Image (tube, rainbow, N blue to C red):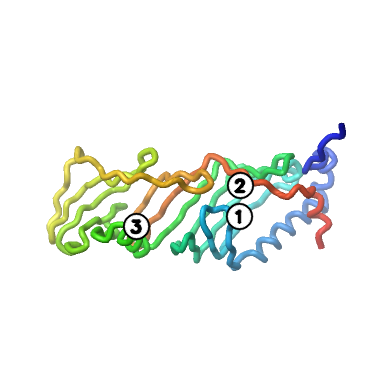
Amino acid sequence: MPEEPSLWPDPAALRALMAGPAGALLDRLLRRAARQLIGRRFTVPGTGGELVLRLDAVRARPEPLSVAVGQFGDVGVSASDVEWRGVPIRRLDLACRNVHVRPTGTAVAAPVTLEVAVGIDVVRDLVAAARPAVRIDAGASGQARVAWSHRAETAAVHVVPEIAGRALQLRPTVLEIRSRRFRLPGWLPPARIALPDLPRNLRLRDVEPGADEVVLRLVAGQWAEELPTSPLLDLFTMS
């Protein structure tokens, strides 16, 4: 039986090609593609809900000889003016490590990290929609201030968010009553919130409250995506 065609031509035959004009052409193609995409808005499929974003930057400097065998190195993407499932997101930074394309036409990155920044006002509205009696605000030094909505100005508990397995823990540290603050003992149990399943095997690794935003850091061990199986050399025939 004839062998199934591979996405990649013979690497030995490509080395000389990639070391010469074709390598420079690939670099120009990547730079031109990035310039044409920067500043445009995109809808990204396969994200567990409609994801719309404005592309701000693409970071990728693959070596031509590595590309000849399907190795693209590290690829980073930054975006702003993001919206996912109707939730506005200030910015998004995606880092894909060890990006490579298998001979079968599957693009793989391992690992993948994602950092998302959400305005504190958006977080407050999301919490209020789920728990109208609770108000959340930014605290000091990476903490959040949690209070009953009808007593938000007179009493609150400051909590430190922590990730424990598949749950978000809110560890109480300070009790605030009017202008006075009382440090709470470390043995108090944290409140636990079960985390939902996230798309693309992402797991929440860290939550960092700031003065006016909350930063979420997520990680996935590996992403794999099927690509069209047209040979890489088709890139060199593009005008």
Question: Residue at 42% of width from left, 44% of height from top?
Answer: 205
Question: Residue at 35% of width from left, 60% of height from top?
Answer: 126
- Going from N to C along the chain, the mark reached first, 3 or 1, is 1
How many C-alpha atoms fall within 10 Å of the one at disc 2: few (<14), some, or many (≥20)?
some
Instruction: Name the residue type under label 2.
Output: Asp
Left/right placement of residue 93 relative to residue 174 reads right
In-front residue for pair 132/200: 132
- Find the residue positioned furthest to the top: 1
Question: Residue at 60% of width from left, 57% of height from top?
Answer: 58
Instruction: Kindly identify which residue carries mark 2.
Output: 74
Between the C-alphas of marks 1 and 2, the distance is 8 Å
Q: Position of residue 2 (x, y in %)?
A: 87, 34
In the depicted structure, whether residue 28 falls above or below residue 164: below
Instruction: Kindly identify which residue carries mark 1.
Output: 59
Is residue 22 something one can see in this rendering? yes
Is residue 90 something one can see in this rendering? no
Where, quadrant-wise, is the N terminus in this rendering? top right
Q: Secondary structure at mark 2?
A: strand
Question: Residue at 59% of width from left, 56% of height from top?
Answer: 45
Instruction: Name the residue type under label 1.
Output: Arg
In the depicted structure, whether residue 205 falls above or below residue 234: above
